Image (spheres, grey):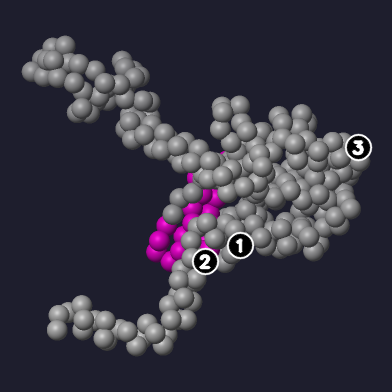
Amino acid sequence: MDINQILIQALGPILTNYWWLWLLLAILSFLKTPFMKGVIGEALVNLAANLFLDKQFYKLFKNVTLPTEDGGTTQIDHVIVSRYGVFVIETKNMKGWIFGSANQKTWTQKIYRHTNQFQNPLHQNYKHTQTLQSALNLEPDKLFSLVVFIGDSEFKTPMPENVVYAGGYIRFIKSKRQAILADSEVANICRALESGRLKPSIKTHVDHVRHVKTIVEQKQKLAENACPKCGRPMVLRIAKSGEKQGNQFWGCSGFPRCRAVRPA
């Protein structure tokens, strides 16, 4: 009897009698994926909006994907349109301690001894508001950027008023009590969103994810080719003299102010 037959005989009864346990473990693993965390976070924000915001005065749009001027797309988790303004909401389902400020390029997530850097969500949401402002032809003071953290996270640095936990995002929206849009403007914005957004579908989402992945890869390539001293792009050059004459090397594009080099 070979090892495969021994394993089949040993594990067969376990797989047969406890199939539901393996199914449960698979489901739990799937729920912990970044995709499902995002889905759950957005669902909680949607639920809160439906429960605590009067639908007569607040119109909720979910997963709004808009074309951008560079030929790509930007995807907004939630847009809430009201006479009190247009709220552009970015959702983050994260755990651990969160460190950051409005002007920092990256924020920090710390879980025990593990530290992770992530893009400042306010900067991430800035592109969303800019695209929406252009698409709707709105003044900047008619839009409000809002970042909502879902999950077991805790802010360890003071946050701007528009960065809140799940329980605070409804309060933020309701704190805007001055009507800045007429009912006719609200109706026009809603129609423009419906007509201007890409059709919500799996294909739209996959295309957007592919676009984002391409941008990230391009940024990584630029970062890898950045000058270690000044951050400018490195340029492939050929040595014109010396012992390495004729050999290629990477030199800073800021030459002669920056003379950093590295081997090709």
The mark that comes first in sequence, 2 or 3, is: 2
Query: Badge 3 is on which residue?
Result: 184
Query: Tag 3: residue type?
Result: Ser
Q: CA distance from mark 1 to mark 2?
A: 9 Å
Q: Quadrant of residue 245?
A: top left
Q: Nearer the viewer, residue 41 or 107?
A: 41
Vertically, is 106 above or below 155? Answer: above
**Secondary element type, mark 3:** helix
Q: Dot 2: within a 10 Å radius of its alpha carbon, few (fewer than 14), some, or many (20 or more) residues?
A: some
**Secondary element type, mark 1:** helix
- Location of the C terminus by quadrant is top left
Residue 230, x across and y down, in percent = 37, 28
Q: Dot 3: within a 10 Å radius of its alpha carbon, few (fewer than 14), some, or many (20 or more) residues?
A: few
The reply to whether residue 125 is visible in this rendering is no
Q: Which residues are magenta?
A: 95-115
Query: Tag 2: residue type?
Result: Leu
Q: Say whether residue 259 is magenta.
A: no
Question: Furthest residue to the right?
Answer: 183
Question: Furthest residue to the top?
Answer: 240
Vertically, is 190 above or below 78? Answer: above
Q: Which mark is residue 40?
A: 1
**Secondary element type, mark 2:** helix
Q: Residue at x 39, y 64 (%)?
A: 113
Q: Nearer the viewer, residue 178 or 99?
A: 178
Q: Quadrant of residue 133?
A: top right
The answer to whether mark 1 and mark 2 are in CB contact below 8 A is yes
Query: Badge 2 is on which residue?
Result: 31
Q: Residue at x 88, y 51 (%)?
A: 57
The mark that comes first in sequence, 1 or 2, is: 2
Q: Dot 1: within a 10 Å radius of its alpha carbon, few (fewer than 14), some, or many (20 or more) residues?
A: some
Q: CA distance from mark 2 to mark 3?
A: 42 Å
